[in-house]
């Protein structure tokens, strides 16, 4: 999925992968222009290539980075993201309650959860937080997964304790000391980052690795692969 950044500088391309079976949910944080969305698209492309019958829902509140998905059934923009999350959540409930025996891989990508929540009234925002929290706590057993991307990992955007269920933390670019702490990392552990697509990945709160997102030579082909599983 990514390259180990430290080894890459020594000329060794060693992969750093997301083991979604043991680490079911991921949170990607970083400032604008750090390469968060680029990293996410690579993750989605890997899913399309390597996980049979995968199905992905993309909630792109700002309607900015996933324009190529317009017209796909699993792509939502602006306030429609609330309905998109609700559909994903009820598909999870159907599987959990035994009404759907399918166990294929399902993932919801939530772009800028904070921006979505800030547009909702308190009751609506709390309902979204509860759905995300339930997916984070129970989704693994039913092969339902969550990938959230935003600039900061503030606890205020998640129900109490829900953020602790992200077993993968991806920090792109030079995050602030506060943002690093919110993601469970000491800023002192992070060396300055240069270049788009560089960052760190923390697995299960202990394994911190410098990462570099590989260059995609055929981006149109990558987007075609993603489009095929967003439904």
Image: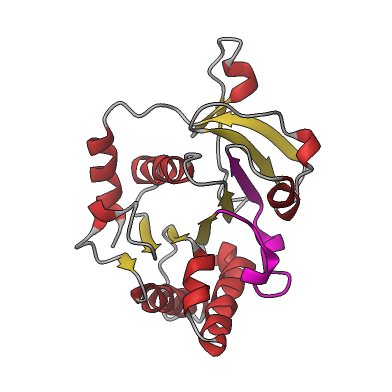
Q: Residue at x 47, y 74 (%)?
A: 92
- Between residue 122 and residue 89, name the one nearer to us: 122
Can you give x and y, in whole percent of width and height, for residue 99 in the image? 42, 81
Magenta range is 151-172
Residue most extreme to the top: 11
Residue 54 screen position, x and y as percent: 37, 54
Residue 185 is situated, as x and y percent measured from the top left of the image, at: 75, 45
Does 23 appear in magenta? Answer: no
Query: In the image, is 83 to the left or to the right of 123?
Result: left
Q: Nearer the viewer, residue 97 or 228?
A: 228
- Image height check: is 54 above or below 128? above
> Which image quadrant: the C terminus?
bottom left
At horizontal 47% and vertical 77% (from top left) the residue drawn is: 119
Image spot of residue 163 (x, y percent): 67, 63
Asked if residue 168 lies in the magenta stretch, the reply is: yes
Quarter residue 7 falls in: top right
Residue plotted at (61% across, 43% down): 171
The answer to whether residue 214 is above or below residue 152 is above
Q: Is residue 26 left or right of residue 33?
A: right
Is residue 31 rendered to the left or right of residue 42? Answer: right
Q: Residue furthest left?
A: 71
């Amino acid at each position: 999925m990514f390259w180990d950044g430290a080894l890459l500088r020594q000329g060794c391309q060693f992969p750093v992968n997301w083991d979604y079976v043991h680490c079911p949910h991921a949170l990607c944080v970083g400032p604008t222009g750090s390469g968060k969305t680029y990293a996410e698209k690579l993750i989605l492309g890997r899913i399309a290539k390597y996980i049979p019958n995968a199905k992905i829902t993309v909630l792109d509140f700002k309607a900015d980075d996933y324009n190529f998905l317009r017209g796909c059934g699993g792509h939502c923009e602006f306030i429609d993201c609330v309905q998109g999350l609700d559909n994903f959540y009820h598909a999870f409930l159907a599987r959990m309650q035994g009404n759907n025996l399918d166990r294929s891989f399902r993932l919801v990508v939530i772009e800028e959860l904070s921006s979505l929540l800030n547009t909702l009234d308190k009751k609506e925002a709390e309902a979204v937080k509860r759905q995300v929290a339930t997916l984070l706590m129970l989704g693994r057993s039913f092969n339902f997964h969550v990938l959230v991307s935003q600039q900061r990992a503030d606890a205020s955007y998640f129900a109490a304790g829900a953020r602790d269920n992200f077993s993968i933390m991806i920090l792109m670019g030079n995050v602030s000391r506060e943002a690093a702490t919110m993601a469970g990392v000491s800023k002192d552990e992070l060396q300055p980052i240069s270049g788009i697509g560089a960052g760190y990945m923390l697995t299960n709160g202990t394994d911190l690795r410098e990462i570099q997102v590989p260059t995609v030579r055929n981006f149109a082909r990558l987007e075609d692969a993603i489009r095929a599983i967003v439904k």
